[in-house]
Image (spheres, rainbow, N blue to C red):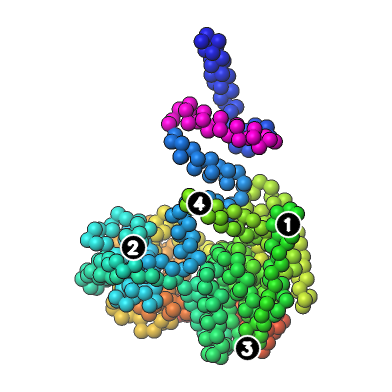
Amino acid sequence: MRARSIVASLLFGSALGAGGWWMGQSREELPALDPVLEPEVGARVFEQVQLLIATRYVDSIPIDSIYRKAIAGLVEELDDPYSSFLPEQRMRRLAEQMNGEYVGVGMQLGERDGWATVIEPIPGGPAERAGVQAGDRVVAVEGESTRRLSNDEVIRLLRGAPGSAVSFTLDRLGADRFTVSITREAVTRRAVPRVAMLRPQVGYVDVNVFGANTATELRVALDSLNRLGARSVLLDLRGNPGGLLEQGVAVAELFLDPEQRIVELRGRPGSVPEVISDREPQWWPRLSVAVLIDGNSASASEIVAGALQDHDRAIVVGRTSFGKGSAQSVFPMTTGGALRLTTARWFTPLGRSISPSIDSVPDAGPRERVLADTARPRYTTPMGRVVLGGGGIVPDVIAGDTAQPAPVQAFVRALGPETARYRDAVARTALTFKQRGAFTTALQPVSRDMVNAVWDEMSRRKLPVDRDTFDAAAPWIARALGYEIARVAFGPDAEFMRRAQNDPTITRALRLLDGAGSPREPFARVDDPGVLLPMPEPTFDE
């Protein structure tokens, strides 16, 4: 016993003496474990560590928790942000996202003034059929107040088994509170939520995810635009995080010819790369196409943008995309849940990798590891155009401001943490004007008196902005108010058409496509000074 006590004392003293050094080390600077070459040795060490943690660690940890932590640690040590273990609940959410279907009442909710508020009832869903409107507050579910509940908690209360009923109470400006009872049913989120004609011959399609039905929905949408006389189309992939690889391939196939490459998948060293090529003739060979992307366009979005750019089939407009050049497979576990694991890296038809360059800034995070354009690998398309690799899809035409105007920056700084309450003030002002019938058309200009009403609402809420700062930002506040009034008074499609007028990426794409007589014509306009003109600053009488 004495010898054991001496050893323990020495270890304790060493730990105290080295404490300043040990606590000052980052995880990367800690001594690395010696490599364990023999599998049986590794298994034995793992069992010993697990046993010691279960029996000797200062806090009691259940054995099932140790297993979960071990699984999480193993996946984390891959140093791959796209590989993860998915418990059953996350698996269900992933399946819901990919299938675009859930059971509920069909409302998109957002938080306003601390209440779950209807942003938009899903078209054709049970809530819309029951008369629910944008701007309605959900103040109770089954008689229980939602005042202190988060948006996600309210959503969970509204969901349930198909055929079950749920009642909830709504607060609508200018009306008494009322309760609706709705039978829950399967609600489908559309992968293509918006289709519109922006000009007499120019259509627009928004694709927000690559789920199970994206290619089918897109084909139907483009057929409808074709019947309306569209000779050009804006394919908006901005903010699209990707999804199913096969759906990205299927969308690219709609625009390419047989045997044209779409993507190449390269797996583990020694495996044979898989080249995926188009199998069928394209559907609309005379249609001019502009693909819109931004920093949140990722994965399957980048596969589509890269394939159409490499084949000179579409001109790409916007900001450089996210740069997710890998593909994941989902492996279900027999005990529930699944492992999502990166199993391949992918390359565009010209052989471009769009993953960020690890060598450019070694200590940077994934989003910062991007080469400057002058250092990126360069590739030549069949038309002789130069496209770049080495970190995201680089657009053919840059559009979309990344920095806010100085008056808006000053306004946001003055708001500080009260930005959400400012948005609430704008929403409440818009609802007031809706009740008064102040807007007769969705594109009606916003007057100074209307903007002054926002100031009055902000003053009532005691928001920390002085009048001079507010007045300097007033033209941009007028835009925000106009969007909100258009949405609550005329619906989300009206809001979109109003926003599209001021969207620099859409505006630049329209300059490229408007009046184009062939799919190749937009490429000849890239250096046209008219295309590159900046958007004018907003005024009150737009």
Q: Which residue is mark 2?
A: 160
Q: Is residue 495 magenta?
A: no
Tag 4 near tag 3, CB within 8 Å: no
- SS under mark 3: loop
Q: Which residue is mark 3?
A: 515
Q: Main secondary structure of the magenta part?
A: helix
Q: Nearer the viewer, residue 21 or 511?
A: 21
Q: Earlier in the sequence, mark 4 or mark 3?
A: 4
Residue at image point 48% right, 49% down: 335
- Residue 308 picture location, percent across and down: 67, 74
Instruction: Specify the label residue 414 is tagged with.
Output: none
The amino acid at mark 3 is Gly
Q: Which residue is mark 1?
A: 271
The amino acid at mark 2 is Gly
Q: Which residue is mark 4?
A: 334
For the magenta stretch, what is the residue range? 36-60
Counting other residues with Cα less than 10 Å from the Cα at mark 1, is it few (<14), some (14-19), or many (20 or more)? few
Is residue 232 rendered to the left or right of residue 472? right
Residue at image point 62% right, 53% down: 366
Counting other residues with Cα less than 10 Å from the Cα at mark 4, is it few (<14), some (14-19), or many (20 or more)? few
Q: Earlier in the sequence, mark 4 or mark 2?
A: 2
Which label sits in the foreground, 4 or 1?
4
**How far apart, in angstroms, are the residues tagged by discs 4 and 1?**
27 Å
Is residue 471 rendered to the left or right of residue 397? left
The amino acid at mark 4 is Thr
